Amino acid sequence: MKATIYHNPRCSKSRETLALLENAGADVTVIEYLKTPPSRAELARLYAKAGMTPRQGLRTAEDEARSLKSASDDAILDAMVANPILIERPLVETEKGVRLGRPPEKVREIL
């Protein structure tokens, strides 16, 4: 099985999710999204495939997220593209779907 993880190696949940994928025998493509951010269209596609809104994919723990409290989904996507730290991680995609690995066990639904 192939899997793509939008990963931040400094994040414990992201590292746990990557380990879960590797232990499940997945052929994992790792994208360090802070170094290689997804495009706006790619983010929108991932969230749609996950059945979630950009707001649900917003990393609210970041100071920059405070100004987006009442922003539209379009504005949130624009902010995520401009500042990828606002993307909650890790996002995992397989042929079965997309899940946000919070908690990491959520990705088992698409393995």
Image (cartoon, grey):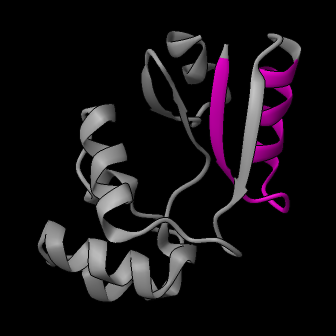
Q: Is residue 62 above or below residue 38?
A: below
Note whether 43 is above or below 104 in the view shown: below
In the image, 49: left or right of 97?
Answer: left
Query: Residue 1, position in %: x, y?
Result: 67, 13
Asked if residue 18 is among those painted magenta in the image, a careful observer would answer yes
Nearer the observer, 24 or 15? 24
| Residue 54: quadrant of the picture | bottom left
User: In x, y percent, where is residue 63?
Assistant: 50, 86
Looking at the rendered structure, the number of numbered marks drawn on it comes to: 0
User: Residue 25, image x and y in percent?
Assistant: 83, 11
Image side of residue 76 versus residue 15, left or right: left
Q: Please indicate whether residue 73 sits to the left or right of residue 43 in the image.
A: left
Residue lying at 29% horizontally and 62% vertically, measured from the top left: 41
- The residue at 66%/22% (across/down) is 2
Q: Position of residue 111 (x, y in %)?
A: 59, 10
Residue at left offset 79%, top offset 35%: 18
23 displayed left or right of 29: right
Name the quadrant containing residue 26. top right
| Residue 33 found in image quarter | bottom right
Is 88 part of what is drawn in magenta? no
Q: Residue at x 16, y 72 (%)?
A: 74
Residue range in magenta is 2-22
